Amino acid sequence: MFGHTFYHGSIRRFVTIFGTLFNDIYLNRPDPTHNEIHTIKVPVTYGPKEKVLARLTADPELNRMPAIVLPMISFEMTDISYDGSRKLNTIGKRYKKDDADANKMYYQYNPVPYNINFSLSILVKNTDDGTRIVEQILPFFTPEWTVTVNMIPDMDIVMDIPIVLNDVRLSDNYEGDFETRRALEWNMTF
């Protein structure tokens, strides 16, 4: 566009950073005597929760090997919106000297401020699993968690990116008899 081609992978980097925040969550399931007997690493996948739920309920007879084992975390980028309150002067530039040639300078104009919104869904079979996972996430967002990111390595542009937790909701999708598969969903928006 406008005669210039460039790609810094910024949006991809934001998605990767967001998913990485939640890829180290473990669930300890105690036995009746409250000793930890089973530790599960909760898998994280990119995609809408509807696709995960559709895969989960694809076998109404419940006699095939499961394609998805709960608990599971799913996330997706929902939208990108302009944020005029953070706008900097459009003609402002950031400079960097060329490492090989001291007489050469590179520059980049000030970034354009956008907010990238994400939704995160935690899918579990029972309430206890859900609360154990949610309690590992909530304390870190007060309501934000700031991540330092090397946004454009070629220009040595390092930014602090706040990730803000906006909303947490619980929904129970249980309908039908006792043999129907149940999925509790914790939905968070960032």
Image: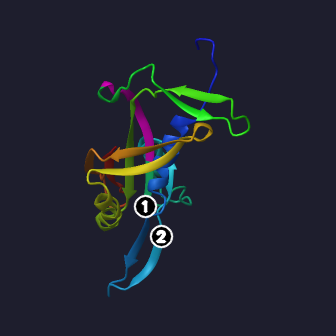
Give how far across and how far down residue 111 sits, in percent.
46, 28
> Which residue shows up at 50% across the image and 59% down it?
43
In contact (CB < 8 Å): disc 2 and disc 1:
yes
Q: What x and y, as percent, mark residue 17?
A: 49, 48
Q: Residues within 10 Å of mark 2 (few under 14, many from 20)?
A: few
| Along the line of sight, the residue nearer the viewer: 77 or 156 | 156
* Amino acid type assigned to the residue bearing label 1 in the image: Pro
Provide the residue designation for mark 2. 40
> Is residue 149 or residue 129 the one in the foreground?
149
Given residues 112 and 109, the one toward you in this image is 109
Task: Give the x, y percent position of residue 180.
Answer: 37, 56
Disc ID at residue 1: none
Where 130 sits versus 89, above or below?
below
Residue 58 visible, this orientation? no
The reply, left or right, for residue 154 in relation to residue 113 is right
Badge 1 is on which residue?
71
| Quarter the N terminus occupies | top right
Q: Secondary structure at mark 2?
A: strand
The answer to which quarter of the image holds residue 135 is bottom left
Tell me which secondary structure the magenta stretch mostly adopts.
strand
Q: Earlier in the sequence, mark 2 or mark 1?
A: 2
Q: Is residue 47 left or right of residue 175?
A: right
x, y percent for residue 112: 43, 26
* Residue 181 horizontal side relative to residue 59, left or right: left
Amino acid type, residue under disc 2 in the picture: Ile
